[in-house]
Each structure stands twice: as C-alpha cells, then as structure tokens.
Image (spheres, coloured by chain):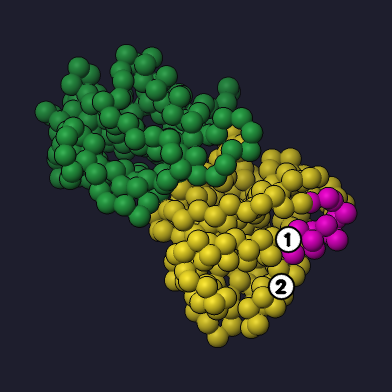
Chain colours: A yellow, B green
Amino acid sequence: VSTPYTELQLDTLREVANIGSGTASTALSQLLGRPVDISVPQARAVPLATAIESVGEPDLLVTGVAIPVVGDLPSLMLAVFRDDDSRRLCEMLGVEADSEVGHSALAEAGNILGTHYLGSLHTLTGLALEPAPPQVVQDMLGAIVASVLLEDATDGDLTLFIDSELTVEGEACSLSFLFVPGATGAIDLLAALGMA
Amino acid sequence: MVRIGEIAASADPSDVLVALGLGSCMGVAVIDRGRHVAGLAHVMLPEAPRGGEDTVRCADRAIPALLGRVLELGGRRSQLEIAMVGGAQMFAARGGVGVGARNDVATRAALKRERLAPAAAVTGGDKGRTVRVEVGGEVCYREAGGTLVRLLPKGGRA
C-alpha cells in the first residue's frame, strides 16, 4: 500500500507531535512534581487493521481516556494507561486506583495532556482546536483502539496516527498517547503548516 | 487467532479459533457441531466501498466468504449454528449511529441474504469482548474483566 503522505510530510507531523508531547509532558510533570520523559513520536499512515494491531495485545485490559477534538480539525486523542501504570499514576496523585476518584484523576491527567498538546498545535498552526470532555473506559486495548479508529472510517482507508510515549522518570509508569486526525484532518493540519 | 478483518475455518476438532478484543468489531462464529467444522470472521466494518479492493474485512463480503469456507470443509448448510459477538459502542457516539450498531445490522442482513439467522448473539452494550470457537463443538465469549460464558450449544456456563 502506498502512502498518500510524503516522507517530508510525515517528518513534519512527527516534529509537530514532538513539540505537542513536549508541552504535554511538561504539564504532566508539573502535575506530578517529577520529571517526565518523552520518546521520539512516530507518525505513520497505515491501513486501519495494521494500525489497530500495531498498538499491542488486543485483549490486554487498559484504561483509555478519549478526548474528542472539535473546531477546525475534528480529530481524536487517546491516552492509554496499562493497568500497572494507571495504578502507579493514581498513587502519585494520592488517589485510590479503580475508584471513581481514580477515574476522574486519570481523566484529568488525560485532559491536561490533551489541552497542552492541542495548545501547542494551535500555536504552530493557528487552527482553533478545542477538547471536548474526556471519556474514560476500562476495557480491552484492541476493543478501545478499534472503536476509536473505526468510528468514521471506510474500508481501504489509511489511518494516520501520531503516537508518543511518556515515561515518568524514576517510576515504572508510562503511557502512550495517540493523536488521530480524521480523514480530512491530516490534510488540513498539513495545509495549515504550509506542507499540503 | 483470527486477527481483525480476517476469516479462519477448520475441520480439526482440536482447533480453537479466537478473535480477541472485539469492540465495535463483530465476531461471527459458524459451526456444524455434528461434523466438527467451524469458522470465525472478525468483521471490521459494515460494507465494503464499491469498486474497492477484494476484502473480507466488511460484513457484506465476510459472511458469504465465511460460509463458503465452512461448507467447503464439509459443513452442512442445514446444520449450521451461528453466534454473533461484538458490535459494542464503547464511547458516546459523535452523532449518528455508531459503527458497532452498523456492524450488527449489516451482519444480520448479510446472514439473512443467506437465509440464516444467529442462534445466539451478544451484541451492543459498551464492553469489549473476546470470542472463542472450539471446532469440536463449543462457542464461548468473555467480556472485558469477566469470565468465559458458553453461547453454543445453548444453556449453562462453560
């Protein structure tokens, strides 16, 4: 399958993701009072089935915080916390995991990441991007990711996803963070960057 | 393991076919328990676009292909039992009917075109599920965080 994006465009999206997740990790580190590292983000355009599989074990139980993005660039952000990671994060925030307040804390962490990520996208592109309230689900990884990616999809679509990994320094706690622009979202994003 | 958008079938009673982590996707199991022939489709989307590539990722093409595989292995059309698992809506819909519900409708419609109907169906809701087909004669499913429940043959826990 050939990609509709050039290597230069994907590089640009990676750089945007790098700046976005850098800002997001700074915000998370302020929330937690400890340093947070980011991996080099990946930007990939792949068929839907490949994208869904590439995220990990389909039946692994995880907590997903989905943040719909409204405005100039309808898209979706998804923060995925594996079981141990969400428990560790709740501990650091001083709340009980697997409780209602634990869920709100994860939603809030996801919200902070999302808002800062979007803020830096706005600074770079001038696009109006606003996060809708986050939704938290505890479920199977494959089920969460497939449901998110397939909602507006047509078979044969390539999905563009931008994947960052954040790790809390000195703690066994990391999370992955996906930014999934809709079908026209990627083009609009590149256009705003002068790269369409 | 039947990965997303794929189909598997077997006539070996010791084989187990599994589709993991079904969210809005639909797992469709077809079994002839008398002959120990079964198949499983992991349906991703309701309909293949016109003029698109040849694919079994969508319900409209997956169901005929799945039946074809099971019949080819000796399954008898009159003895087929069908179970559907999946089609959940995990996040609040962003307007319109969610893809899980559309997969459900499209799968039932594709079965109806073959003059078939599911004997058991666990669809909709907001939980991810896994479906497990023992070619020897049992179909079970498990909901996220739950235990294995038998769907076929009907009645009782696994």
- Does the stretch in magenta take in A191? no
Q: Are marks 2 and 1 on the same chain?
A: yes
Mark 1, secondary structure of its residue? helix
Quarter location, residue B10: top left
Q: Position of residue A19 (x, y in %)?
A: 76, 67
Q: Which mark is residue B132?
A: none
Q: Is residue B154 left or right of residue A36?
A: left
Looking at the image, which residue is at 57% across and 42% down?
B92
What is the tally of numbered marks visible in this picture?
2
For mark 1, what is the residue? Answer: A115
For mark 2, what is the residue? Answer: A27
Q: Quick one: which residue is furthest to the left in this view?
A: B34
- Which chain is disc 2 placed on? A
Disc with the residue nearer the chain's start (2 vs 1): 2
Q: Position of residue A172 (x, y in %)?
A: 49, 79
Residue type for callout 2: Ala
- Does the stretch in magenta take in A117? yes
Looking at the image, do the residues carrying marks 2 and 1 touch, with CB atoms under 8 Å apart? Answer: yes
Mark 2, secondary structure of its residue? helix
* Figure check: A38 above or below B148: below
Residue type for callout 1: Thr
Instruction: Sort mark 1 into few (<14), some (14-19) or many (20+) by Cα contacts within 10 Å.
Output: many
Does the rendering let one see residue A25? yes
Q: Nearer the viewer, residue A71 or A142?
A: A71
Quarter location, residue A110: bottom right
Looking at the image, which residue is at 63% across and 78% down?
A32
Q: Nearer the viewer, residue B48 or A178?
A: A178
The magenta-colored residue range is A115-129
Looking at the image, which residue is at 65% across and 82% down?
A33
